[in-house]
Image (spheres, rainbow, N blue to C red):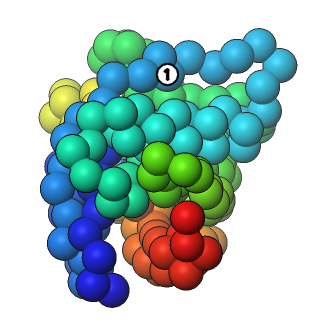
Amino acid sequence: MSTKIYLASASPRRKQLLSQLDVAFEQFATDIDESQVEGETAEAFVSRLAEEKALAGVEIAEQDYPVLGSDTIVVLNGQVLGKPTDQSDAIATLTALSGQTHQVMTAIAFANKSKVKSMLVTTEVTFKHLSQQEINDYCATKEPLDKAGSYGIQGGAGRFVTNLNGSYFAVMGLPLYETEKLLNEFIAEGV
Ligand SMILES: Cc1cn([C@H]2C[C@H](O)[C@@H](COP(=O)(O)OP(=O)(O)OP(=O)(O)O)O2)c(=O)[nH]c1=O
């Protein structure tokens, strides 16, 4: 890939992951309303947020390069578990995820002045049974606070995972294979 892109994200993880692709990029944050609309499915919700981040980025971008937006949510039995509001919310979320299989949905979207194109990557993750002590100790590290589902697979929660079916990088915030593929399609389609 030889084009330049913009990463419309405040996330240091997404910056780190995007650096693994062979594409030059500039990063900036966007500010959109991240609330779920009543009746909206988890899939539609996460895809809409990725598209809105990319489109908000197009408004900020100085040049008409593709803008990448992304959003990650954790879904347990159809219920969206976003970032925790505080430590006790993180404890409640991890208690719910203990011993269960959940989905991590990451949507990616590319936009420019004339079009937007998105893709959803769903990964199934199974956690071992977590003791109250393990949950409390993990939450005390504060790692859960800025992460969907109150955990970071790349950090202390990696040891909770007994099975993963899908993209590890999508769980961390940006699926590498799919991002490169979507960008190539976006560019190949032209304006
Ligand atoms: C499940 C999980 C999520 N996360 C992170 C990825 C995302 O950064 C975050 C979910 O929040 P998002 O709202 O998707 O992203 P963000 O607010 O961090 O960044 P921006 O909107 O500016 O792009 O949770 C991990 O780092 N590891 C994990 O294992």
Q: Is mark 1 within 8 Å of ligand 1?
A: yes
Residue 136 found in image quarter:
top left
Residue 39 found in image quarter:
top right
- In this view, 1 is above or below 131: below
Quarter of the picture holding the C terminus: bottom right
Residue 153 point in image, percent of width and height: 36, 57
Residue 146 visible in the current orientation: yes
Quarter of the picture holding the N terminus: bottom left
- In this view, 6 is above or below 42: below
Residue picked out by circle 1: 34
Residue 189 point in image, percent of width and height: 61, 75
Q: Amino acid at mark 1?
A: Glu
Residue 183 point in image, percent of width and height: 47, 72
Residue drawn at x 32%, y 13% as measured from the top left: 86
Residue 30 point in image, percent of width and height: 30, 31
- In this view, 175 is above or below 173: below
Residue drawn at x 55%, y 81% as measured from the top left: 188
